[in-house]
Amino acid sequence: MTLRFSDAGPEFPRPLIDAMIDGNVVFLCGAGISAPQLPSFQKLVEDTYRALDMDRDRSEDLSFNEGRYEEVLGALGRRLADSPAMEREVVRLLQIPDNPFLGNHETILRLSRDLNNRPMVVTTNFDNLFELALHSADPSQTVRHESVAGQALPAPGSVDFGGVIHLHGRLEDTTLELEKTPLVLTSADYGDAYMRSGWASRFLFDLVRCKTVVLLGYRAGDAPVRYFLNVLAADRTRFADLKQVYAFDAVVSDVAESDARWTALAVEPLAYKATTDIATGAPDHSALWNDLAQLANVIERPKRSRRTMAEEILTKAYSDSSETEQKALIWLFRDRPDLRDILIAALTDPLWFKFMREHDLIPDIDLSWIIPAWIARDFESYERLEVALRWQAVLSPKFNENISDRLREVKSVSPLWLRAWRLFADVDVRPDGFDLTEHHLIRTLRSDVVLDADLRGAVSHLAPRLELQSSRKLIASVPRDEPAVRVADIVWPDMVLRDSGELLELIEVLTNRTDDAERLMDLATEALKSTIATSVDAGMIVETWDSNDQDVPSVEDHPQNDHHGGVIGLVRLLINLLPNVARQSREHARDLARDWARLPGSVGVRMWLHALRNPDAFSSAEAATGALDLSIGDFWASRRELPLLLRDRMGDAAPELVFQLERRIITEGDEYFGQYDLEEGQVDWRDHARDSSVWLRLKMMGAAGALSPDGKAELDAIVGRRETLNREAEDTDFFGSYSFGVRAVVGDPGPIEAAADEERLEVAQQFIQSRDFQLRDGWSAYCRSDPQGALSTLSGAGWEMANAELWNTS
C-alpha cells in the first residue's frame, strides 16, 4: 500500500512513511540534490579538466564513458606534476553561489529526523548547503555542532548519532565555522574508505542495520552507490536485520526502467516522472520535490495532514476523483479508524461508501453505524434515503438498529419523514438462503414431532414483509422540489411475500393439520392483524384505498390467485382452515371472523363475507344481517364475496331481510357511483358501472331463488339498456381483473365503449391513471372486446409518449 500526491510523483510505501514518523529514516544524498546550482560529478570532472587545460587520454575516456568518474580523477591526479592542483580546482568549482536555493535541502531536513526532531542526514556531497539550510531556519543555532565529516563519524544507533554527516568529507565555510576535511574524491580515496581502511563501509553497514536508508540524488551507476551496495550485497546474505534501502529514481515514462536499474541491486526504487524544462533544456524534478514537501507535512503533522487530505478528497464527487486520490484514500483509511468522523462530516458523494467497502477499508460492522451517522445529518434528504435503501439489505440488522438509535437522538425531523424512517428501521431484511425455509418447514410439519414453534415459524413464513423503495426514484412523475404530503411521496411501500415455489404445498400441509387448526387460525389471524397494521402505518390503507386488496383476487382458492403475493398466503390459510374450525369450535370460528370484519381496509371485510357463507359458523339470518350492515363502500366494492354470499345464503333467509337487501341493491347504486366526480370533457361512465354492479347482485339473488318481481323488473330494465348483459353471470364477472394464461383481460370496457369516438382516447387516458382498479383496467378489457376499435383509436392519435402505456396494454 502506497501514498501518492500527484500522478507524476513517486509512490511512497506505507512502511517507509511509518518509519519516517517513527524517526527511523536516514536520507543518503548525492550531487543531484544540489543541481543545477552545483555541478554533478560528471560535470565536475569535465570542468576540472577544462580548468587545468587537460585532455582525457584513451583510458580516462573509457572510464568517463562508463561513469567511473572517481577513476578518471585518480588518473588525472597521477598525471599532474602538481597533483593537489586537481583538488584545489574541485574545491573552487564547488563554491556555493550567492543566495543559493535551499528549498530542496530544507525539505530533506524535514523528512530525515529522529524522534527528538534532530536532523540526521548523510551526504556524499562536499558542499555545505545542508548546514546553510539549518542556519537559515534558525540563525541562532550553532551549525558546526550539527555537522560532522570524514572518519569522525558518529556510530549509527548511538545517542550521538545525528546532524549533517558528510561521508566523503566537507568543504570549509568560515561563516558557519566549518573546517575543511579530507575529501573522498578519487578511486584511491574510495578504495581506502570502503576497502583498505573500510571506515565508510562499516558506517554504512551499521547504518542499514539501524535505519531505513533512502538514496536521493544518485543514479544507479554512481560511484557512492556502487561502493555502498557492493558492501551490502555480501552482508545481506549473512545478516537478516538489514533494513530496506529505497532510491528515488527519475524516469521518462515507463516505471519498468527504474525497476530494471535498481532491483538487481536489492534496492526498492521509488520512480517518478521527470520532464525537460523547455527554457533551459535541463531535467525538471519538480514533481518529486513538490511531493516530498507534501510528505514532510504528513510526517511533521501526521494526524492533521491526514485529516486535511481525507477531507479534500471526500468533498469531491467520486467520478471527479483521480486514481492518485483514490489510492491516497486507501492509504489514509487502511487499518486506521481515526478518520471516521471526517468521513461522516465531509463526504458528499455516497459512492465513496461503496469504494470503502470494495477496498476493505472499513468493515461492514463499522459501515453499519458510519452510514447511519452520515444519513442522520439530514434525515429529510431524498438522496440519503436512497442511500439507506441501497445499504439496508447489505448491512442489516445492525444497520437498521443504528438508524433507530439515530432517530431517537434527532429532534428536528418532521412527523412525515419520521414515520418514513421508522418504517424503514422496522423493515425485516431476511438473510440469504431464506428460500430453503419452505422445504425445511414442510419436512418438519410432516414429521412425528411438531412443536408450537414450528407452527409459529410456518405462519410467520406466510406473512409478507414490508419493502420500501424511493418514491422519487420509482415514480418519475413525483417532483423532487415539492414537499412530501404523504409517506408514499417519500418511500413507496409494498408487502412482499417470499415464495420459492413451495408456498402452496406449505399451505396444504398446514391445512391438513386438523388437530392444530384452531391454533393455526389464531396465529394466522394475529399475523394478518400485524400485517394490516403495518400497511396502515405505511399509508397502504387509507379511507378509500387498500393496496393489499389487489393481491387477493379471491379470498377462497381460485386460479386467479396464482402469482400473487402480499397477504394472499395468510388469507388462503385462514380461509382453508375455517371449515374445520367451524365444525370443531363454532364460537371460536365466529369470533375470529368478526375480528376479520373489524380490520382496516377491504381484505378483512371480504374474508368476513366469505365466512358468512359457511352454515356451520353463521345462520342465514346472520349472513343477511352481515350484508345489510356493510358500509356503502364495502357493499359495492366487493366484486366477488358479496355476490357469492347472496347466491349461497339468501335462498333460506328471512323474507324481510331479503327484501331489505334487494331494495338496497336497487336504490343505493346511484348514490355510490354518483360520488365519483367527472372531469371536464369526460364521458359519464357512472350509469354503466352502476348497471353492471346491480346486475351481478340481482343475478345472484335470482340464482338463490330470492328475487322479487321488483328485482326481476330492475334486472330486465338493465338488460334492456345493456345488451352485453343479456347473459348468465360468468366467472370473469366476479373479478376486477381476470387472467387467461398469459393474456390478461382487465376491467369493464363499458364506459370506454360508451364514449364518443373523438372522446374515447381521452377517457382511456384518464381511466388508466385511476387508483380504482376497476376504472384503471377498463382499457385492457376494451382492447379484448373490440381490438379493431382500440387500434383505430390509437392509430388516429399518432405516436405520442402520453399514449405509450395504452399502446403497451393493447
Image (spheres, rainbow, N blue to C red):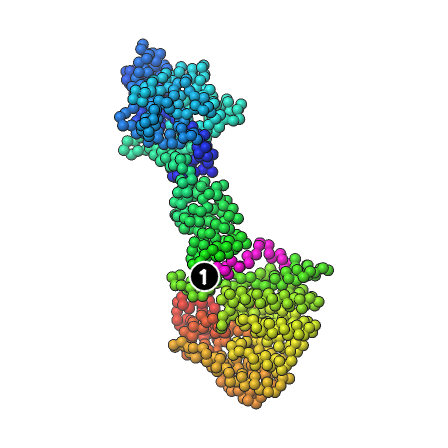
**Residue 797 place in picture, x, y as percent:** 39, 71
Q: Residue at x 59, y 79 (%)?
A: 626
Tag 1: amino acid: Trp
Apparent side of residue 52 relative to residue 345 in the rendered image (left or right): left
Question: Foreground residue, 22 or 405?
Answer: 405
Residue 602 in percent (x, y) is at 54, 72
Q: Which residues are magenta?
A: 421-439
- Mark yes or no: residue 522 visible: yes
Question: Please, which residue is most extreme toward the left here?
Answer: 98
Query: For mark 1, what is the residue?
Result: 417
From the top left corner, tell me how far across and down residue 634 is, in percent. Answer: 53, 76
Q: Which corner quadrant of the image does residue 459 belong to?
A: bottom right
x 67%, y 64%: residue: 509
Q: Residue furthest top?
A: 81
The residue that appears at 38% across and 77% down in the rendered structure is 680
Residue drawn where x is 34% and y is 26% of the image: 141
Examine the image and state in which quarter residue 251 appears.
Answer: top left
Verify whether residue 807 appears in magenta.
Answer: no
In the displayed structure, 588 sits above or below 257; it is below
How dense is the environment of label 1, judged by Cα within 10 Å: few (below 14), some, or many (20 and up)?
Answer: many
Please state the horizontal and vertical placement of residue 313, each as a whole percent of the image: 40, 45
Q: Indicate the secondary structure of the residue bearing disc 1.
A: helix
| 268 sits left or right of 128 in the view | right
**434 is within the stretch colored magenta:** yes
Measured along the vertical axis of the image, is residue 195 above or below residue 321? Answer: above
